[in-house]
Image: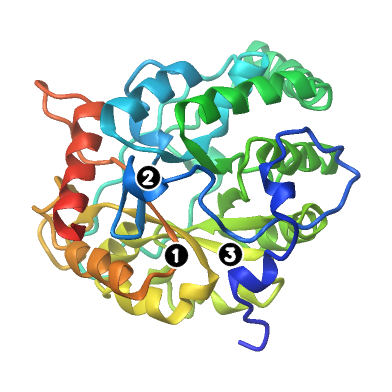
């Protein structure tokens, strides 16, 4: 790739810019500071072990009570001091209207492939064909139309003080929000500006979206404008014939990867460490989980850490040896036993990582 550019080169700028918690107007363009730990002595507490930052995507606690205060509580209970924050909890704190369809459409589990490559490369079907997306009634559609108008009005009117209050909750707890997952590529331009502005005000250096050509081309100019990264998460796309990260990364140095090592291994059977070595300077964060290989029965299935086939130990030790400034985020997706809960399981994953790294 001719456009490869290291994170440190792209993130040139004043250290004061990153430390500032002020809400920057959407029309302002600026660069952000190089990656540096936001809290003194971060190596000595929390979940950074031998230089490797272990965090979590807050999606891991989706089965628990929601809310920023609860997320902070879960972080403290698990020892985590670095998170990829799902935007729903943030926007709820900021005063967003409730989505009337939130409890009407529940995602259905995807059956695992029975052979290598089977089903794993299949593109996401259109909404009408998905089992979790039934046709809305006229009343429901009217409610959704009103919600879409209300949420846009909310986003364009969020106060700087409210965002600063959300940021302070995490700062006071010693927790870094390094990503906000807004997934805003289908929003209006004004709302996309809001996403990057709000994420920056929260101390994040990136806004996350699912990877696609249209999403990359849409968000890259906004990331450049705001001096941030647009990072893109994969599911099973790398199992598709001819799929490559190269065309996406060539769009802009502001485009980075939120590489899901579990989905990569589970769908392709390939060692994610090889991918990480090749693209380490274009990977902002990595989701870590344990899965079976696609040829295993059942294939591409989430497992308790250490019971699957993903080379987690190799991945963690590679990150320790190489010292790349890449966030590693636990994404808890395996089935939780009735006597446990998501907080206990994430804590176990943290301990699993620590035992390997220390």
Which quadrant of the structure image shows residue 293? bottom left
Residue at mark 1: 237
User: Which quadrant of the figure contains the N terminus?
Assistant: bottom right
Give how far across and how far down residue 178 sits, in percent.
53, 46
Q: Residue at x 67, y 14 (%)?
A: 95
| Pair 1/3: label in front | 3
Check contact, mark 2 vs mark 3: CB within 8 A.
no
Does dot 2 land on a helix, a strand or a loop? strand
| Pair 1/2: label in front | 2
Give how far across and how far down residue 103 sits, in percent.
47, 16
Label 3 neighbour load within 10 Å: few <14, some 14-19, many 20+: many
| Pair 2/3: label in front | 2
Q: Is residue 77 left or right of residue 254?
A: left
Which quadrant of the structure image shows residue 19? top right
Q: Is residue 142 left or right of residue 243?
A: right
Give how far across and how far down residue 334 sits, in percent.
21, 41
Does dot 3 land on a helix, a strand or a loop? strand
Residue at mark 2: 55
Residue at mark 3: 256
Q: Residue lying at the far right in this picture: please name it.
A: 27
Could you say which disc has been placed on residue 134 in the image? none
Q: Residue at x 66, y 88 (%)?
A: 2
Does residue 63 lie above or below 130 as drawn? above
């Amino acid at each position: 790739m001719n456009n490869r550019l290291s994170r440190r080169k792209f993130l040139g700028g004043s250290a004061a810019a990153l430390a500032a918690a002020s809400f920057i107007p959407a029309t302002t363009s600026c660069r952000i500071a190089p990656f540096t730990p936001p809290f003194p002595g971060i190596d000595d507490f929390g979940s950074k072990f031998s230089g490797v930052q272990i965090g979590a995507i807050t999606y891991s606690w989706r089965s628990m009570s929601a809310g920023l205060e609860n997320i902070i509580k879960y972080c403290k209970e698990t020892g985590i001091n670095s998170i990829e924050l799902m935007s729903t909890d943030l926007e709820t704190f900021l005063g967003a209207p409730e989505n009337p369809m939130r409890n009407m459409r529940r995602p259905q589990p995807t059956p695992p492939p029975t052979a290598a490559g089977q089903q794993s490369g299949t593109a996401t079907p259109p909404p009408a064909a998905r089992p979790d997306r039934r046709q809305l009634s006229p009343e429901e559609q009217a409610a959704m139309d009103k919600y879409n108008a209300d949420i846009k009005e909310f986003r364009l009117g969020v106060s700087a003080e409210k965002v600063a209050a959300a940021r302070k909750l995490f700062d006071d707890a010693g927790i870094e929000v390094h990503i906000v997952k807004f997934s805003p590529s289908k929003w209006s331009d004004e709302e996309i500006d809001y996403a990057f502005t709000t994420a920056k005000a929260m101390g994040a250096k990136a806004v996350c979206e699912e990877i696609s050509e249209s999403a990359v081309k849409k968000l890259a100019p906004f990331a450049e404008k705001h001096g941030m990264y647009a990072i893109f998460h994969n599911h099973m796309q790398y199992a598709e014939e001819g799929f490559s990260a190269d065309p996406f990364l060539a769009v802009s140095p502001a485009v980075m990867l939120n590489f899901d090592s579990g989905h990569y291994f589970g769908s392709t059977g390939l060692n994610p460490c090889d991918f990480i070595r090749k693209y380490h300077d274009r990977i902002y964060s990595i989701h870590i989980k344990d899965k079976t290989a696609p040829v295993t029965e059942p294939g591409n299935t989430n497992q308790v850490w250490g019971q699957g086939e993903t080379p987690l130990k190799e991945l963690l030790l590679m990150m320790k040896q190489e010292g790349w400034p890449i966030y590693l985020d636990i994404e808890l997706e395996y089935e939780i036993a009735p006597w446990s809960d998501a907080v206990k399981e994430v804590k176990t994953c943290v301990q699993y990582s620590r035992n390997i790294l220390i």
